């Protein structure tokens, strides 16, 4: 068993090296925050892009650009200083079930965080635990919607404390926290250790994880995230979420099936 895990780790490390490079950015929603250089612009554009990151990646990128274009060169400046008439620019915006009403609510939620709560990073720094950011996601949702809002919009910010895998927000956290020299993730949140990040779990990464024996739970939910985190942290205690690149690449780019590999 130990030898199998060692061989699997070596295989996954190879896949991390294959996908964790600037070429990854070209087709991924992470290209959106890579359009900016100011910390707050990176955070806000990344958060909004991650919020609509479900479905076809080409469509996600296209609509994320549409969503941010009316904010001009600085999403942060727009969020904090926009006037009521500026919001008409977003009329008609839609990405799947996320519409202009949801977007306007997110704009106001972000304004509340940056004006009153030390921004997105401030929430996660305050509520991180020694081994997890999942409770902090719960607190983010509470604080984010501590403004007048339509009930329908709440579904667009997941909460692991109610059982969700919270894939999109965990992906956003990987972007902000994880740091290496590969040029993909930003690593601009210095007060949160990458060791407590959780893997962004979706249908693709979940299927690959099960096929490789990394995950036994059948549902892609918060319990599955905890199980997968435990295995990935045993492979790399300091940077477990680097394996998201491997699971994603195998699931989406290679349509991975273990039966085709000699190792298994």
Image: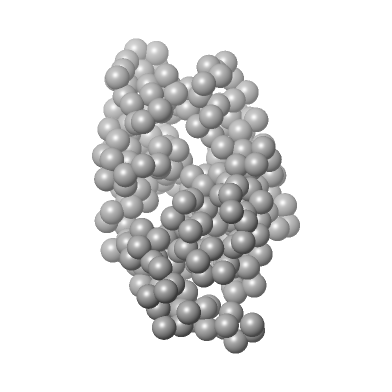
Residue at the extreme right of the image, as rendered: 130
Q: Out of 21 and 96, give the one closest to the viewer.
A: 96
Left or right? Give the position of 43 relative to 85. Answer: right
Q: Is residue 128 above or below residue 91?
A: below
**What is the x, y in percent for residue 63?**
30, 35
**What is the x, y in percent for residue 204?**
44, 55
Residue at the extreme top of the image, as rendered: 85
The answer to whether any part of residue 186 appears in the image is no
Residue at 52 percent across and 21 percent down: it is 152
Residue at the extreme bottom of the image, as rendered: 3
Q: Out of 233 and 89, give the one closest to the viewer.
A: 233
Q: Is residue 175 above or below residue 67?
A: below
**What is the x, y in percent for residue 106?**
47, 27
> Can you say which quadrant of the picture contains the N terminus?
bottom right
Left or right? Give the position of 228 relative to 59. Answer: right
Counting the numbered discs, the total is 0
**What is the x, y in percent for residue 128?**
68, 49
Residue at 34 percent across and 31 percent down: it is 95
Residue at 38 percent across and 24 percent down: it is 99
Q: Out of 11 and 211, give the one closest to the viewer.
A: 211
The answer to whether any part of residue 211 appears in the image is yes
The image quadrant of residue 46 is top left
Its colouring scheme is one colour
């Amino acid at each position: 068993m130990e030898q199998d895990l060692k061989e699997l780790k070596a295989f996954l490390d190879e896949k991390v090296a294959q996908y964790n490079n600037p070429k990854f950015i070209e087709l991924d929603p992470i290209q959106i925050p890579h359009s900016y250089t100011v910390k707050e612009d990176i955070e806000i554009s990344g958060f909004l892009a991650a919020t609509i990151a479900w479905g076809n990646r080409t469509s996600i990128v296209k609509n994320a650009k549409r969503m941010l274009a009316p904010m001009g060169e600085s999403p942060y400046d727009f969020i904090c200083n926009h006037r009521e008439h500026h919001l008409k620019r977003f009329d008609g915006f839609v990405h799947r079930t996320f519409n202009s009403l949801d977007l306007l609510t997110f704009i106001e939620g972000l304004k509340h965080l940056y004006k009153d709560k030390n921004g997105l990073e401030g929430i996660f720094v305050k509520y991180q635990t020694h081994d997890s950011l999942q409770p902090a996601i719960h607190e983010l949702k509470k604080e984010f919607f501590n403004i007048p809002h339509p009930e329908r919009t709440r579904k667009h910010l997941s909460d692991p404390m109610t059982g969700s895998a919270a894939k999109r927000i965990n992906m956003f956290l990987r972007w902000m926290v994880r740091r290496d020299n590969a040029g993909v993730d930003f690593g601009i949140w210095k007060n949160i250790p990458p060791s407590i990040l959780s893997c962004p779990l979706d249908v693709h990464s979940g299927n690959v994880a099960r096929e490789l024996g990394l995950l036994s739970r059948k549902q892609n939910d918060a319990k599955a995230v905890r199980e997968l985190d435990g295995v990935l942290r045993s492979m790399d205690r300091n940077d477990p979420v680097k394996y998201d690149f491997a699971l994603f690449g195998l699931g989406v780019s290679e349509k991975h099936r273990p039966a085709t590999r000699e190792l298994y």
